[in-house]
Image (tube, grey):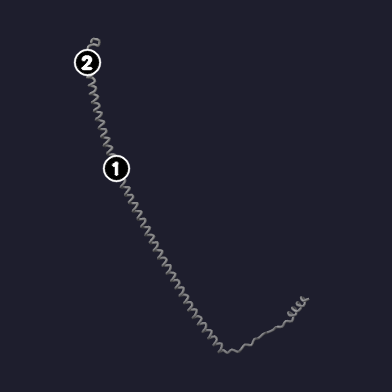
Amino acid sequence: MNKILSAIILISFFILQHTVIAVETSPRISDREIIESLAEIRGNLKRLDEKLDTVDKSLNKRIDDLDSNLNKRIDDLDSNLNKRIDALDSKLNKRIDDLRTDINSRFEEVGNRFDTLQWTLGLFITIALVIFGFVLRMQWQMHRRQTQMETILETQREELSFIKKLIEKFQPPRGVL
């Protein structure tokens, strides 16, 4: 029932509607007041523009200061990094030079040792050849003496056999004495 009643009231509002016009009465403003208000608004706009300009300049100055500070810090970091790299480069070059010097001195030591070894080996070979020559000479002399001794012994053997034969000839026969 409530539903039907609310539906009837709603339909009656749509059917019986009237146009209502609302008019507000405003106070009368003179042209002078309008001009003064416009002038005041323009002044406020100029001040606002000036404030915006100062804020813009201040902001630009702060950005420029930050930019210069950032550039300065980057330059400082760059110079510090370059100094560290240069120091590292000089240390590395010094180490390389030290290694070259050390390697060159070791090569010289090895060269000197090879020279010493060459002289020692040459001396050893010379001494060995001298000893070998001495041994060969002694062997040749011994062989020559041996040959002489053999010839002497051969002649002495012949002489001994001759003397033996002579002694046997001069001895009386065995059963005689």
Work out whether 88 lies above or below 107.
below
The one of 161 and 33 positioned closer to us in this rendering: 161
Residue 20's x, y, as percent? 69, 84
Badge number at residue 120: 1
The quadrant where residue 162 appears: top left
Which residue is denoted by mark 2 in the rendering?
167
Secondary structure beneath dot 1 equals helix
Residue 86's x, y, as percent? 38, 62
- What residue is drawn where x is 59% and y is 89%? 29
Q: Amino acid at mark 2?
A: Ile
Q: Amino acid at mark 1?
A: Thr
Residue found farthest to the top:
176
Please indicate whether residue 8 sits to the left or right of residue 62 in the image.
Answer: right
- What residue is drawn where x is 34% and y is 52%? 102
Residue 130's x, y, as percent? 26, 37
Badge number at residue 30: none
- What residue is drawn where x is 50% and y is 82%? 47
The quadrant where residue 149 appears: top left
The one of 163 and 89 positioned closer to us in this rendering: 163
Residue 173's x, y, as percent? 23, 11
Mark 2 or mark 1, earlier in chain: 1
Q: Quadrant of the C terminus?
A: top left
Secondary structure beneath dot 2 equals helix
The one of 54 and 172 positioned closer to us in this rendering: 172
The one of 150 and 14 positioned closer to us in this rendering: 150
Residue found farthest to the right:
1
